[in-house]
Amino acid sequence: MIIWVLNPDELYLAKQHGYAVADNHVFIENGGSGKTLNRSGLREVRSLVQVSAIQALICLDPDRLAGNLGHLLLLEEETKKHGVQLLFMYLPREDSPEGKLMYWSDVVG
């Protein structure tokens, strides 16, 4: 299990979803811009996603993961393809057509 940590509350969300988080699976980005995919922590997380080495990726908010909608869609597709759950602390989503619509309207809006 891996968690992208920008805020200690994300560890709470992981525990709330029943995930145990190993110390070496916590990545803290200090001041990295979400406008680029070329961030050391994100590169490492993506490599773990691509080999399905983790169960979930938990972030505070979509724009903290990717400040560009195209990048967010790419990351969402990568996690889905490799069976990794993508969770956002401040933007929970329901796995229903209505939930997906609300999620994407919040992301885009």
Image (cartoon, helix red, strand yellow):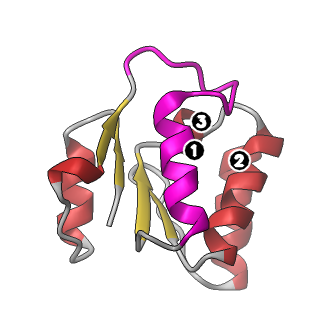
In magenta, the rendered stretch is 30-51
User: At label 1, which amino acid type do we have?
Assistant: Pro
**Reading the chain from its start, which is encountered first: label 2 or label 1?**
1
Report x, y in % for residue 89.
38, 52
User: At label 2, which amino acid type do we have?
Assistant: Leu
Q: Residue furthest right?
A: 70
Q: Is residue 105 visible?
A: no
Residue placed under numbered mark 1 in the picture:
62
Compared to 54, does 13 lie above or below?
above
**Classed neighbour count for the residue bearing mark 1: other residues with Cα under 10 Å, few (<14), some (14–19), many (≥20):** many
Residues under numbered marks 1 and 3 in contact, where contact means CB atoms less than 8 Å apart: yes
Residue placed under numbered mark 2 in the picture:
72
Report x, y in % for residue 77.
73, 65
Residue at 44%, 14% in the rendered image: 31
Tag of residue 92: none
Compared to 63, does 23 lie above or below?
below
Tag of residue 63: 3
Q: Is residue 13 visible?
A: yes
Q: CA distance from mark 3 to mark 2?
A: 8 Å
Residue 5, picture quadrant = top left
Q: From the viewer's side, name the closer residue of 5 and 102.
A: 5
Mark 1, secondary structure of its residue: helix
Residue 50, picture quadrant = bottom right
Residue at 77%, 54% in the rendered image: 73
